[in-house]
Amino acid sequence: MAKGTTTDFSEENTESAMQVMDWMRDLTEQSLNQSKSALEGFFTTARKASEDIDEQASELRKRSLLLASRDALQHLQLCA
């Protein structure tokens, strides 16, 4: 009987260990999925911010060139 009890105890420990390993694997997988989602969100936001900055910089260049050319032409007209 004692030998059978030891075997049952070992089997229960093995089952418990397997359940814990399965639980840890599931937890790790969930954590990785959450991290992936967070990173995707971060990069999407960063990409959008970069595009917005590029658009603003482009608009600033256009306006600066427009003002500079207008001022230069006005200056030449005043000198003439």
Image (tube, grey):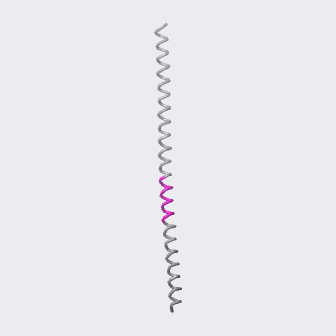
Up the image or down, 29 lies above or below 39; here it is below
Residue 46 versus residue 18: which sits nearer the camera? 18
Spot occupied by residue 35 in the image (x, y as percentages of width and height) = 49, 56
Up the image or down, 34 lies above or below 61; here it is below
Query: Over which residues does the magenta segment extend?
Result: 27-38
Residue 28 versus residue 3: which sits nearer the camera? 3
Kindly give the residue lying farthest to the top in the view shown: 80
Spot occupied by residue 11 in the image (x, y as percentages of width and height) = 53, 82
Q: Is residue 64 magenta?
A: no
Residue 56 versus residue 35: which sits nearer the camera? 35
Q: Is residue 30 magenta?
A: yes
- Residue at image coords 49%, 32%: 57
- What secondary structure prevails in the magenta region? helix
Up the image or down, 24 lies above or below 15; here it is above
- Residue at image coords 49%, 27%: 62
Spot occupied by residue 45 in the image (x, y as percentages of width and height) = 47, 46
Spot occupied by residue 55 in the image (x, y as percentages of width and height) = 49, 35
- Residue at image coords 51%, 71%: 22
- Residue at image coords 50%, 51%: 40
